[in-house]
Amino acid sequence: MNAMMFPIPLYIGLREGAREVEKGQGIGTVGNDSAIETITGDSNVVYFTRPVDVPLYVEIDITAGEGFTDSVAQETAIRDEVVAWANANHAAGDDVAPAMLLSRIPAVASGRYSAVIRVDDVTPAVTTGIFAITDRQVARFDTSRCTVVIS
């Protein structure tokens, strides 16, 4: 009987948790990192490649309207919300859509406003469209690289 007919499961540990993938028996794994797989009881070495972190800069320019509070506390709340959401919702290979980041402002601010957001891997950030991330990269956000300006 062909061993390829009976794939064995591999449990790949990711930052987001473990997921099961299957490969045929006898087919080696590849990558620049390794771990010992013990779930099957065979203690096999599994090779894999971790995604490379891409530190991104985010600039949010808000023009305050009626009922919108212009304060340092408001800028901090918006920055913290955007960064927390972005890190929680971007896995390896996920492109960054600035409009999705802007959608977090109403979670911590009220009133009328208009906003422009730029995302880039250099400062000052210039990209207002989709920032492309490859399948071997993961976007990383930090409050030290996120600025909010309310005028």
Image (cartoon, grey):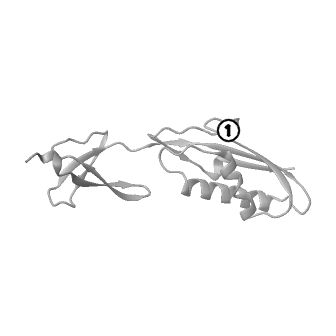
Seen at 47% across and 47% down, the residue is: 92
Determine whether 80 is above or below 140 in the image: below
Q: Secondary structure at mark 1?
A: loop
User: 124 or 129: nearer the eye?
Assistant: 129
- The crowd level at tag 1 (other Cα within 10 Å; few <14, some 14-19, many 20+) is some
**Outermost residue toward the right in this view:** 66
User: Can you give x and y, in whole percent of width and height, for residue 146 in the image?
Assistant: 68, 48
Q: Provide the residue designation for mark 1.
A: 129
Seen at 17% across and 48% down, the residue is: 5
User: Can you give x and y, in whole percent of width and height, for residue 10 in the image?
Assistant: 26, 54
User: Can you give x and y, in whole percent of width and height, for residue 93 in the image?
Assistant: 49, 43
Determine whether 125 is above or below 149 in the image: above
**Residue type, mark 1 in image:** Gly
Seen at 16% across and 45% down, the residue is: 4
From the viewer's perspective, tell me whether residue 2 is left or right of residue 117: left
From the viewer's perspective, tell me whether residue 6 is left or right of residue 19: left
Corner quadrant of residue 72: bottom right
Q: How many marks?
A: 1
From the viewer's perspective, tell me whether residue 143 is left or right of residue 2: right
User: Can you give x and y, in whole percent of width and height, for residue 61 in the image?
Assistant: 79, 46
User: 145 or 50: nearer the eye?
Assistant: 50
From the viewer's perspective, tell me whether residue 136 is left or right of residue 58: left
Seen at 80% across and 49% down, the residue is: 115
